[in-house]
Amino acid sequence: MEGMLGQVPSWMEDLAEPASEHSWGLFRDLNLGEDTELSGREKALIGVGVAAAINCPYCIYFHTEEARLSGVTDEELREAVNLAADTKYFSTVLHGNETDLDEFKAETDEIVEYITRQQAPADD
């Protein structure tokens, strides 16, 4: 941990001993790992969006700084936060109105099929 971060953050010391090594492994492999499907930049933007959606000031600060290290602009940070807010907003609407999940999936599938057809090259 010290080799990758330059220190052992004090908050990592608050983890119960049976979980500390496992927790560091998750953090290291998912957030800092290079052998993942997502780039560091993508992971940072996801982190910012999730952090904003769950209202965690610690995570917001960490992932914002992580994103800046990856070259993310302030405009991109704002967009990530707005996308998270949009998702949280519509999730609230869907859950609060008890929207039927099967109907929602069927409509989404129809939308995807429509967009796919619209994007297909025109037949000559």
Image (tube, rainbow, N blue to C red):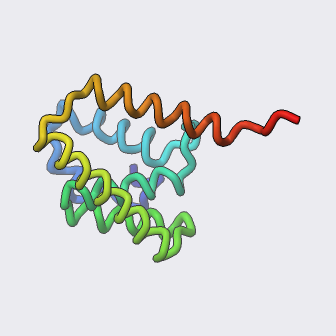
- Front in this rendered view, residue 94 or 28: 94
- Depicted 3 relative to depicted 60: above or below: above
Residue 37 placed where, x, y %? Answer: 56, 37
Tell me if 60 is positioned left or right of 77 in this view: left
Considering depth in this image, is 20 or 99 the residue closer to the camera?
Answer: 99
Residue at position x 47%, y 36% from top? 111
Mark count? 0
Quadrant that contains the C terminus: top right
Outermost residue, top side? 102
Q: Position of residue 104 (x, y in %)?
A: 31, 31
Tell which of 74 and 33 is nearer to you.
74
Please tell me which residue is depicted at 52% across the width and 68% down the height of the picture: 72
Q: Residue furthest bottom?
A: 74
Reply above or below: 107 against 62.
Answer: above
Question: Residue 63 falls in which quadrant of the image?
Answer: bottom left
Residue 43: percent from left, percent from top: 46, 50
Q: Nearer the viewer, residue 33 or 70?
A: 70
Outermost residue to the right: 124
Q: Is residue 54 left or right of residue 82?
A: left
In this picture, residue 100 sits left or right of residue 109: left
Across and down, in percent, residue 120 comes to: 72, 37
Residue at image point 35% right, 28% down: 105
